[in-house]
């Protein structure tokens, strides 16, 4: 497994030079979050991730979790790392001060989260899910629930989970069966089985707070009859609740994180939010978790890039096509070969472009939460709604592509366990599935977010791109990128109209086009962020800097992205416009083998 090195210079570039973090924090009223403070937090988090979490990544994969009679033991070192995490106050970083938090904005928490995710994704899921549980209770819980649960979650003494999936349903939660019956004391008895519950049971914290979806008696069928409950493993009075981990899954990756079957046998639960509005409330958790999962794609691209780059500089094989580059050695390092460079640059483009996209989205999360300007709040919320399915599905798809390039750069050594490159592929593969599969995110984007708003949500974004293109139309240094981006931006709207028209004739056109539309959108969004970064880097070079290598590498990676990755949009365009006829023409009986 490559030893993780936090990309601090690039994080500073994104936070300060691209996103002007200090001004953003002033604008949302978080005046304490100065540049020095942000840098100090990043520096401390980097140390923890490099020195404590990264060395446990391969240990977690090889040992996995063990189940014994309802108890789960996490891999060697996980529990001790969690204690350090809590002792150092990391869980409370971006939590409200009333409950013991440090009150910093979410975007600072997300910078830390990127580092944790890259150093050790499986470990990071334990505190990661707690964060979602905290947000849900903060937004929908009663004062008493906040008092009892939030302070313990904020301190990290307790952790949280999200319990949605049941054996017969994951994407289609409308059919879930878990029941909640009211007790005489106003609490509820929760019964049912939830499967695939991440961090559902473990030995790292004294209590686990499950956020559970279940149905009240006589509730309407479908998604309109689902309610949300807090079900703690240990009740506030100290008694053990009737929720037990029945088993843990043996799975492809993220072995260090316990994926649990959770049996609720009349467990005591407490309603959060109004009855039958549970799915709506759970969306707080799910939207948070979707952005968190998008980060897994960035983490996968970053870690596999770090491993592949080190190896490509070291490994010798054959000579460069233009003559030896290391004549004193038996062969040239493989980084001289165009195909190896193609893979490295693809990983770098996804890691750094994805980071930029995620950090920008994090600032929108801050604005939605803290801005006093209602118009800005709404704008950020709309934009975030549009970007969330793209970030979740696109970044995890290309994260897996990047991880596969990592294996490929190592040749046969990538396929064996020793180097850890195959672990990154296995660990990231789940990111395309949980928190809504790529197919479900694509339907959300094209159906709900774009077509149901008559294209308004897309226009919110393309307007921003248009403004940038107009402002840089005469910027010679990045003109080819701007021209390509402006053409694509227009085409994106035209394509949406064409699919919308087809969908009026046949609704299946939406389902047939959705994933191509999402990937097209992902490449377009990333093109915008790369053009922005190229513009800033080129301007810095023109003004004179002693960090020429850093800024030049940004401009070069942006050019590579536009030359070699962005043309993939043409393939997606062709596929989505081809329509759904040939996909649906096959009689089901003809799917034979
Ligand atoms: C390791 C792991 C950890 C997990 N952690 C959690 C957790 O913490 N909490 C939790 O609640 N769940 C968790 N899950 C569950 C996860 O969220 C679900 O597995 C996921 O949402 C998919 O649901 P499913 O497995 O039931 O697949 P299905 O819903 O059966 O989907 C199967 C396939 O059909 C496609 N499909 C379904 N409906 C449509 C449609 N209308 N149009 C097009 N395609 C469609 C899907 O895209 C997919 O390709 C976890 C799963 C795993 C494996």
Image (tube, rainbow, N blue to C red):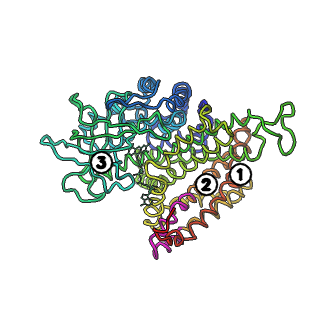
Residue 471: tell me if it is visible.
yes
Query: Looking at the image, is mark 1 or mark 3 earlier in the sequence?
Result: 3
What is the secondary structure assignment of the residue under circle 1?
A: helix
Mark 1 Cα shell of 10 Å, populated few (<14), some (14-19), many (≥20) = some
Q: Are marks 2 and 1 in contact (CB under 8 Å)?
A: no
Classify residue 437 as left or right of residue 11.
Answer: left
Mark 2 Cα shell of 10 Å, populated few (<14), some (14-19), many (≥20) = many
Residue identifier under label 1: 559
For image coordinates 21% across by 41% down, the residue present is 266
Q: Is mark 1 within 8 Å of ligand 1?
A: no
Where is residue 173? Give x, y as percent: 34, 54
Q: Which residues are magenta?
A: 496-519
**Front-most of residues 447 and 416:** 416
Query: Looking at the image, is mark 2 or mark 1 earlier in the sequence?
Result: 2
**Image quarter for residue 578?**
bottom right
**Front-most of residues 24 and 100:** 100
Query: Looking at the image, is mark 3 or mark 2 earlier in the sequence?
Result: 3
For image coordinates 43% across by 37% down, the residue present is 128
Residue identifier under label 3: 213
Q: Give the CA separation, mark 1 to mark 3.
A: 47 Å
For image coordinates 27% across by 52% down, the residue present is 177
Residue identifier under label 2: 528
């Amino acid at each position: 497994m490559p030893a993780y090195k936090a990309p601090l210079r690039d994080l500073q570039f994104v936070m300060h030079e691209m996103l002007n973090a200090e001004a953003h924090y002033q604008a949302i009223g978080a005046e304490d979050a100065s540049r020095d403070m942000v840098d100090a937090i990043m520096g401390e988090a980097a140390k923890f991730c490099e020195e404590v979490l990264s060395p446990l990544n391969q240990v977690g994969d090889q040992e996995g979790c063990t189940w014994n009679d309802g108890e789960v033991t996490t891999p060697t070192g996980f529990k001790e790392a969690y204690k350090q995490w809590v002792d150092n106050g990391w869980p409370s970083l971006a939590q409200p001060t009333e409950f013991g938090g440090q009150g910093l904005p979410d975007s600072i928490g997300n910078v830390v989260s990127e580092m944790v995710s890259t150093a050790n994704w499986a470990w990071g899921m334990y505190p990661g899910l707690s964060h979602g549980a905290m947000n849900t209770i903060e937004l929908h819980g009663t004062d008493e629930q906040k008092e009892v649960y939030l302070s313990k979650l904020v301190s990290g003494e307790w952790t949280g989970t999200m319990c949605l999936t049941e054996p017969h349903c994951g994407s289609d939660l409308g059919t879930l069966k878990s029941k909640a019956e009211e007790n005489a004391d106003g609490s509820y008895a929760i019964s049912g089985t939830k499967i695939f519950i991440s961090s559902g049971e473990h030995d790292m914290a004294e209590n686990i707070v499950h956020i559970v979806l279940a149905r009240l008696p006589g509730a309407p069928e479908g998604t309109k009859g689902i309610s949300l409950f807090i079900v703690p493993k240990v009740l506030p009075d100290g008694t053990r609740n009737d929720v037990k981990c029945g088993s843990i899954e043996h799975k492809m990756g993220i072995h260090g994180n316990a994926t649990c079957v959770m049996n609720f046998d009349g467990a005591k639960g407490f309603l959060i939010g109004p009855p039958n509005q549970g799915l709506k409330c759970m969306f707080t958790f799910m939207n948070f978790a979707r952005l968190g999962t998008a980060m897994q794609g960035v983490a996968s691209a970053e870690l596999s890039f770090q491993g592949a780059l080190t190896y490509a500089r070291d490994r010798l094989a054959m000579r460069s096509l233009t003559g030896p580059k290391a004549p004193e050695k038996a062969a040239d390092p493989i980084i001289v070969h165009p195909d190896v460079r193609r893979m490295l640059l693809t990983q770098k483009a996804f890691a750094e472009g994805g980071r930029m996209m995620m950090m920008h989205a994090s600032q929108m999360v801050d604005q939605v939460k803290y801005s006093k300007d209602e118009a800005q709040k709404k704008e950020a919320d709309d934009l975030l709604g549009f970007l969330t399915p793209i970030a979740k599905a696109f970044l995890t798809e290309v994260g897996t592509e990047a991880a596969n390039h990592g294996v490929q750069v190592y040749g046969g050594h990538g396929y064996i366990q020793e180097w850890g490159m195959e672990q990154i592929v296995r660990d990231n593969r789940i990111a395309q599935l949980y928190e809504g599969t790529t197919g479900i995110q694509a339907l959300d984007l094209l159906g709900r977010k774009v077509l149901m708003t008559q294209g308004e949500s897309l226009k919110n974004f393309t307007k921003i791109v248009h403004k940038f293109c107009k402002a840089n139309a005469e910027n010679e240094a990045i003109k080819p990128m701007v021209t390509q981006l402006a053409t694509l931006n227009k085409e994106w709207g035209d394509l949406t109209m064409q699919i919308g028209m087809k969908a009026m004739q046949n609704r299946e056109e939406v389902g047939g086009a959705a994933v191509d539309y999402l990937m097209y959108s992902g490449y377009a969004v990333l093109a915008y962020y790369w053009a922005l970064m190229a513009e800033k880097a080129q301007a810095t070079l023109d003004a004179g800097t002693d960090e020429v290598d850093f800024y030049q590498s940004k401009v070069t990676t942006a050019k590579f992205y536009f030359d070699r990755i962005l043309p993939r949009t043409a393939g997606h365009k062709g596929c989505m416009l081809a329509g759904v006829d040939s996909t649906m023409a096959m009689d089901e009986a003809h799917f034979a083998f």
